[in-house]
Amino acid sequence: MNKRLILLSLLCGISSAYADVWDDLARASQEAYTALFRGEYVRQTQKSIDSFDIYRLRDKNTFSERRVAKNGKAYEIIRERDKISFYAARAEDLQYADTDESHRFPAVLPFHVRQLADSYEASYQGDGRIAGRECHIVRLTPYDGNRYTQEFCLDDTDHFPLSRIYLHNDTIVRADLFAALDRETLPAAAEVTPTRGLNYSFTRHLNEDFARLGNNDTLIQSLPTGFRIAGYEENTQGGYYLITDGLIYITLFVEPALDAPYQPQIRRNGVFSVATVQTEKYHLTAIGDLPQDGLKRWLESIRLLN
């Protein structure tokens, strides 16, 4: 009887701690999207290190955010609600801006964090210190082994995410972290205005590339556990889909097998991979932030309508 009580108390303790992890992540999600600040963050992959000045301001209930690339890369990203504008000194620099936008930092967690519980185990990994702030490390480990393990260092005060790290086979593939952060002195309006002299630009809205949202009338019969279709555009020849588990995103191209396969043009940044699979009727190409082998297994597990 005593052994059963001890076991029950241990299980209750584990359950309580586990719930706290998800509560911390839920608070981190809200802070990442709503916090106002100025600072500098660093993005490091196995091949390069980039840094950005970042400013976020609320003006008449509208969030405005500006990111200025450093290290000689003359481009900037301006965000107003769901509108994103890219500015660059050279036309070729726009491709870097667009790629970097796909990995926003610090807004990296979904609003409904607990949806990740279908795909990831959450655990505490100790304490850290980033940009002069004490933080605690939370790890999200995928159940299927196809995705990156990800770690976030959350500010001890309000769980604001100070870093995001991608791990594959215990090796750091990519890290985003604040080098400096000021949450007390808010930016001036001029600091969220693009620099004059950036001659090339384009603007888009989130999900504007997809004609419809949802998962009806689609060629996809089933996806791996935890994934859903966020948007798609299709026709009689196939289609392309934005697929997510809430934390990572994959673009899937579906084309008739008799046609020439799609040849994706993508700049590698350490976490992006490309995989292709041929079925009897379709040629599938996936581009996403999964390891190469994991993306291939993910793609092979998709089931399409006959």
Image (cartoon, rainbow, N blue to C red):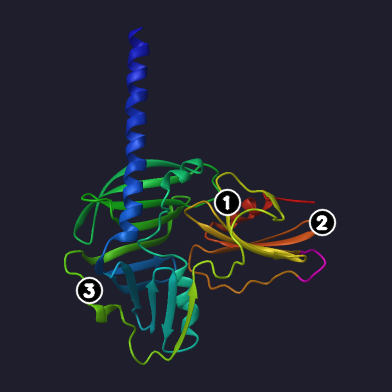
SS at badge 2: loop
Mark 3 is surrounded, within 10 Å at the Cα level, by few (under 14), some (14 to 19) or many (20 or more) other residues, namely many
Q: Amino acid at mark 3?
A: Pro
- Please name whichever residue, 72 or 282, is drawn nearer the observer in this view of the structure: 282
Look at the picture and state if 283 lies above or below 227.
Answer: below
Magenta region, residue range: 256-260
Disc assigned to residue 280: 2
Name the amino acid type tagged 1.
Answer: Arg
Q: Are marks 1 and 2 in contact (CB under 8 Å)?
A: no
Residue toward you, 236 or 126? 236
Distance CA(mark 1)–CA(mark 3): 37 Å
- Identify the residue position indicated by label 3 in the image: 187
| Dominant SS type (magenta) | loop
Q: Which circle marks residue 33 in the picture?
A: none
Q: Position of residue 291 (x, y in %)?
A: 54, 57
How far apart marks 1 and 2 lie (CA) works out to 24 Å
Outermost residue toward the front?
60
Q: Which callout, 2 or 3, points at the residue further toward the start of the chain?
A: 3
Q: Is residue 252 visible?
A: no
Q: Which residue occupies 40% across, 58% down?
A: 108
Residue 103 vertical position relative to residue 244 in the rendered view, above or below: below
Q: Going from the N terminus, do you reach mark 1 or mark 3 first?
A: 3
Q: Name the spot of residue 80 as percent of width and height, x first.
A: 38, 72
Q: Secondary structure at mark 3?
A: loop
The type of residue carrying mark 2 is Glu
Task: Say how many tags the image has.
Answer: 3
Residue ID for mark 1: 228
Q: Is residue 250 visible?
A: yes
Is residue 33 shown in magenta?
A: no
